[in-house]
Image: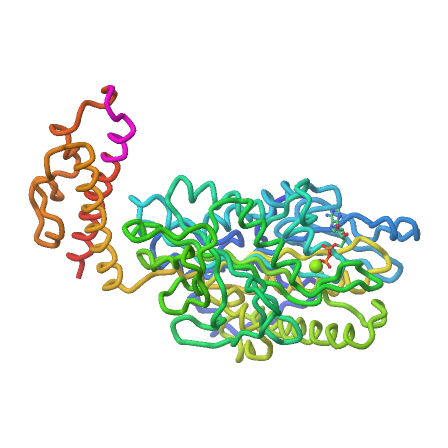
Amino acid sequence: MEAEEERGWRPQEGTRPKMIPRSQLRPRKVPPPPHCPLFPPRSPTEEQESRETRLRVVLRVRPLTCTETRRGDQHVVHSLGNGTVHVSAARHDATFTFSAVFDAGTSQEAVFEGSGMRQLVELAVEGLGPRLKLSVSPSFSCTVFAYGQTGSGKTYTLMGPLGQGDAPGLMQRSFSCLLEQSCSTGLALSASYLEIYNEQVRDLLSAGPPRPLPLRWSKTRGFYVENQLSVDFESLEAVVELLLQGSQRRRTSAHALNGHSSRSHAILTVRIRSRAGERHRQRPELGGLHDGAGRVGCRIAASPHNVPPQPGPGKQGTLCFVDLAGSERVKDTGSSGELSVEANNINRSLLALGHCISLLAKPRGKRTHIPYRDSKLTRLLARSLGGSGVTLMVACISPSSRCLSETLSTLHYASRARRVTNRPMANRVPREKLLQTLEEEIQALQLENQSLRQQLSLPRSREVPGAWPGWGGRYGPGGLHRNPLEEELPAEGAPAWPSLYGLLRDFVVENEQLRYRAHRTHEQP
Ligand code: ADP
Ligand code: MG
């Protein structure tokens, strides 16, 4: 496995150079090439944000299964290093290049680190990071999707062997990463989980028999699922439990190629919000329920203990894991009846996805209409494919000679996906809304300060709560470098209330930063 440097576009070998008339030899303005495939630059500037970024496509080759080995299947896929893979069989000899290739011996951890998954998690979180850095950098809608023939290792790569903790997949590793950041930076995390089964979107987290959910479109949100349940989580155990529950509800069946074949596409979305602006309200308990976008008034069901979180300061990153059902030939799987109806629906939606990818692989100027509306899957992936998200595709293949034609088809599909470009856009909120939430945040922090002061029997702040935007006293922008409580608090390290001291100081400094930021935002034209 080796990360690949992007190679840019080479002319096709064997084509004769065309004679170009002299008049056309004038220098032309060449558009900048798409950005490196490993996601957009981490810069807050909108100009760089909206630069084209190629989909990052990595390949995972699973080991031969016991049945394949017993049968004496040949290895037809060989990793050549440097992100290149070679397929050699009787009448086939082809080489493909990806951003990285993970061969049969690659561990789950190496896939997480080498695929760029960690960077993807960071991009989903970035702008929501430490509260004092609010809005300094953008956070994106990030998606990873696993594609490949049924039984090629998609679910294994994303989730590992579920219920056994020995080889957690990309999902669990990403959750750990997110939770680490949420502890240190005050992020709120929630998860929703749905499947697309026979062209119906169904919630995998709500109780009772799966019921179809409407898929809608709005100018601001694009395609979205209405009334989807979202559950807050604060620990790895809690989110893995959700994943387990949802996966048990997901439609699976046994057939000739996979004893536990997924019959639906599953999409797990983690929403990441900053807790700023929520702290003065009742904190959601673990397992709190709310609608997918964390909006008030769209709650589906909640017990008195499950309080829906209010919108934070308006920024939200998302991390989406898409476990596609595998493409399959009905004659290879021996499917009939319901199984074959499912297989046809799976193949039809994968075909629609392939069609969109083929069209998106053309240069932007030559693209025609992209038929996202052809399937529920392509509608839900519209932002991730050719849209404003950041996307990683993990193509999964079997090395077995018996799977050769499906393997070649996956490799061609994945190669086309490498040419798809997105224009990542940060999830931003309108300025007015940001101002309003900052104002609320300041007031909330002032109240908290006040109550902490009371608990510590400290003198009242000279600052009048709610005085923004006319503030400008000793805590104004000019006074930002001073600790405003220097004269009033006991010296740090003093025996009394050392932890409360730190807490109080943090709140005050944070108040100052937020005031300063609100002031600057207000002043900007
Ligand atoms: P898919 O989701 O593509 O249909 P699965 O993830 O269910 O396929 O994998 C099919 C079988 O192969 C499972 O038994 C799984 O445990 C095994 N498998 C897949 N990838 C690997 C791997 N990298 N290492 C070990 N076993 C694997
Ligand atoms: Mg699967």
Where is residue 177 drawn, in percent x and y?
Answer: 50, 43
| 95 relative to 300, above or below | above
Indicate the quadrant containing the C terminus: top left, top right, bottom left or bottom right: bottom left
Q: In this picture, which residue range is highlighted in magenta?
A: 495-504
Where is residue 455 drawn, in percent x and y?
Answer: 20, 35
Q: Residue furthest front?
A: 304
Verify whether residue 346 appears in magenta.
Answer: no
Where is residue 269 drawn, in percent x and y?
Answer: 52, 59
| 420 relative to 368, above or below | above
Q: Nearer the viewer, residue 135 or 448?
A: 448
Verify whether residue 502 appears in magenta.
Answer: yes
Q: Nearer the viewer, residue 393 or 180?
A: 180
Q: Which residue occupies 80% across, 70% down?
A: 329
Taking the image as drawn, is residue 30 in sight? no
| 214 relative to 270, above or below | below
Q: Residue furthest right?
A: 71
Left or right for 424, reference 357: left
Could you say which quadrant of the image residue 510 lies in? top left
Indicate the quadrant containing the N terminus: top left, top right, bottom left or bottom right: top right
Left or right for 96, reference 238: right
Q: Which residue occupies 25% across, 62% down?
A: 431
Q: Which residue occupies 10% across, 44% down?
A: 463
| 105 relative to 85, above or below | above
Q: Nearer the viewer, residue 2 or 483?
A: 483
State the colouring used for the structure image.
rainbow
